[in-house]
Image (tube, rainbow, N blue to C red):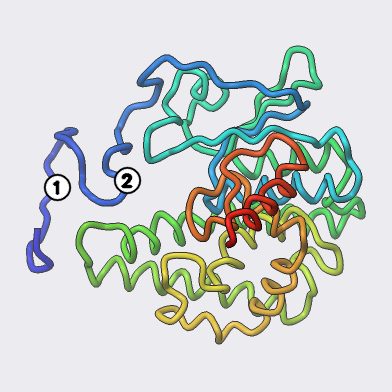
Amino acid sequence: MSNDAEYQPPKVWKWEGESGGHFASINRPIAGATHDKALPVGKHPLQLYSLATPNGVKVNILLEELLAQGHDQAEYDAWLIRIGEGDQFSSGFVEINPNSKIPALVDHTTTPPTRVFESGSILLYLAEKFGAFLPTEHKARTEAMSWLFWQMGSAPYLGGGFGHFYAYAPEKYEYPINRFTMETKRQLDVLDRHLAEHEYLAGDEYSIADMATFAWYGQLALGRLYDAAEFLSVHEYEHVQRWAKAIDARPAVQRGRMVNRTFGEPEEQLHERHDASDFELRTQDKIGDGA
């Protein structure tokens, strides 16, 4: 289909095969498992099944921040779910997330174990479980929740909208790229105006709202998403830049970005994490390889 062709939708849509593009092989109009495969279970209280996409990174960061605060019960096993290969459609994964999206978490400290899916739900579940990274004062807590849900509602326009048509669609079309670029820049402006008057999204306190939003908009501002920093002029959002750089400098955030990461520089990847010492071992591997 060329840019000049006008698509006329049929009266009734029918699935006639792959639509093309980066994720064509895993896109389908039905739910459920495609194959039988049980999920692995490690030794720690929390079992995370994920990949280091922005949605996955949110939870990685919170778990590492909890451990940095000394919450031993936040120790976790991180199992790699390769969404490009359809791991999310295994019977085991569908059992804990019927929506077949990462991340998904199972808490084995409860009887029976508790499944949690959707990144925002996992963040809230863990913050409440450990009493951390969610303000207790009414106004600040409400503000944190508002920004958390702002991120959950806004990011699909950035990822499934802008990111898809700018970076992943099989052909470039002016209308959707302009449409979602405009919305992405509007969202960055929303953040920039708020952060001009607040250190963090909920005020003075770093929270799960910052972790969730950093994974998408902070990394976008730092030039890590869609190779679009110049196109979007992200340097113009000076308050987003300040906030993103401050969060990015946190050791727990740096560790969280490594977990279940299969792309980028080898020294920034930790395909699966099963103990806090894995980070030290990864550093030793880097030194041993002469990297």
Q: Residue 212, located in which quarter of the rendered image?
A: bottom right
Which mark is in front, 2 or 1? 2
- Identify the residue at horizontal 70%, vertical 51% (top origin): 61
- Identify the residue at horizontal 85%, vertical 59% (top origin): 140
Residue 245 place in picture, x, y as percent: 69, 74
Pick whichever, 133 or 41, lies toward us: 41
Q: Which residue is mark 2?
A: 23
**Tag 1's secondary structure?**
loop
- Identify the residue at horizontal 39%, vertical 64% (top origin): 162
Residue 213 place in picture, x, y as percent: 64, 60
* 2 and 1 marks in contact (CB < 8 Å): no
Give neighbour class at mark 2: few <14, some 14-19, many 20+ (Cα, 10 Å): some
Task: Identify the mark at residue 122; answer none if there is no mark.
Answer: none
Pick whichever, 266 or 225, lies toward us: 266
Q: Amino acid at mark 2?
A: Phe
Q: Which residue is mark 1?
A: 9
Label 2 and label 1: CA atoms lie apart by 22 Å
Residue 127 place in picture, x, y as percent: 80, 43
Q: Amino acid at mark 1?
A: Pro
> With 9 as the anchor, is 65 left or right in this view?
right
**Tag 2's secondary structure?**
loop
Pick whichever, 184 or 86, lies toward us: 86
169 w.r.t. 231: above or below: above
- Identify the residue at horizontal 52%, vertical 80% (top origin): 234
104 w.r.t. 189: above or below: above
> With 222 as the anchor, is 279 left or right in this view?
right
Pick whichever, 56 or 178, lies toward us: 56
